[in-house]
Image (spheres, rainbow, N blue to C red):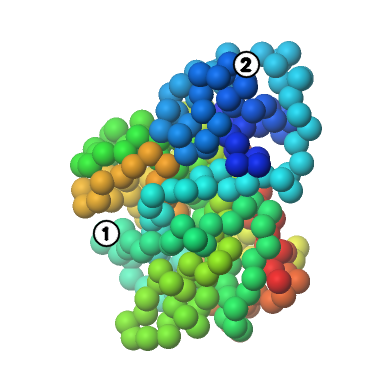
Amino acid sequence: MVSIRFGSIGGRAVFITNSLTKFLDVERASGGSLPSDPMQCLSRWAEVCKVASKLTEHDESSGVALDMSKLDCPVPRPRQIFAIGINYKAHAAEMKNALPKEPLVFTKFQSSLNSPNGAIKLVGEKCDYEAELVAVMAKGGRDIAIADAWSHVAGLCVGQDVSDRALQYANTPPQFSLGKSRAGFTPIGPWITDAASLASRGNLEMTCRVSGEIMQHTQTDDMIFEIPDIISYLSSICELFAGDVIYTGTPSGVGAGRTPPRFLRAGDVIETTIQDLGTLVNTCI
């Protein structure tokens, strides 16, 4: 396989073929040397990549037809989900915030995880969309140097940091974690793409459409803190673990930053696309 795309179907780890039309069960493709559990595979990422690199065109042709609606969250049980606020220059401007001197960190809770095509149940009148580039850790540790950070990353994927703005700003000062952790508010996927295979990983095009209208569009080089900076900063305070998820911030164009605000409504379809990583399609109910 040229690119390694790792996903989950029916709770089992799978490789997505280069054609994006078929998948191979990881445990079976490895002859039983790798487990079926996606989280265990992430902790053995180097072995996963080695098996994937040896798959031939014949192996791929024997794959099972891929039904995108069957894809699960590729990181079903992360120990930690970190998220970075105000990490794009244009987003800081639209929200009238000064550029942060250090990453602004909050958490999203595991119970909010959603599949790449899962429905999002809106609560209240002020639920918002936030397209994000997501990094998934393969190797944890403390005090990870910026120069070494990419070697700790399994891959990148697409995320939505759906936000209940009424809950987020219910008090002064605002709190973020609960407002961003309602059921289904953390879609991730559609799969994890091996970071080492992405030549453009430092500058990817990202687009978010809501019911067909482009609401967010950026290049990720507008980030204030890049992925290695974030990993080094987090690991200087917290121990990181294989399978940890890092939401790296949203660009400008969020509903709360518009005049008038444009919050999500039942029936809206959120399509979040990142260059070389795929698309999430989530319907609001």
Instruction: Give residue 270's position: percent from left, percent from top.
Output: 68, 62
Residue 102 seen from this side: yes
Image height of 227 relative to 102, above or below: above
Q: Name the amino acid type tagged 2.
A: Leu
Relative height, residue 99 to residue 21 (above, below) = below
Q: Is residue 205 visible?
A: no
- Dividing the image into 4 quarters, which one contains the C terminus? bottom right
> Regarding mark 1 in the picture, which secondary structure is present there?
loop
The Cα–Cα distance between marks 2 and 1, rounded to whole angstroms, is 42 Å
Residue 61 occupies quadrant: top right
- Nearer to the camera, 96 or 81: 81
In percent of the image, x 56 and y 51: which residue is there? 188
- Any mark on residue 19, and which? none
**Residue 102 image label:** 1
Q: Amino acid at mark 1?
A: Glu
Q: Position of residue 66 (x, y in %)?
A: 75, 36
- Viewer-side residue, 43 vs 27: 27
Whether residue 33 is situated above or below residue 97 in the rendered picture: above
Percent x, y for residue 209?
68, 61
> What's the residue at 43%, 48% (across, down)?
78
For label 1, count other residues whose C-alpha is less than 10 Å away and answer few (under 14), some (14-19) or many (20+).
Answer: few
Residue topped by disc 2: 55
* Residue 144 location (% of width, % of height): 25, 39
Tag 2 secondary structure: loop
Q: For the point 76% across and 29% down, which residue is it?
A: 64
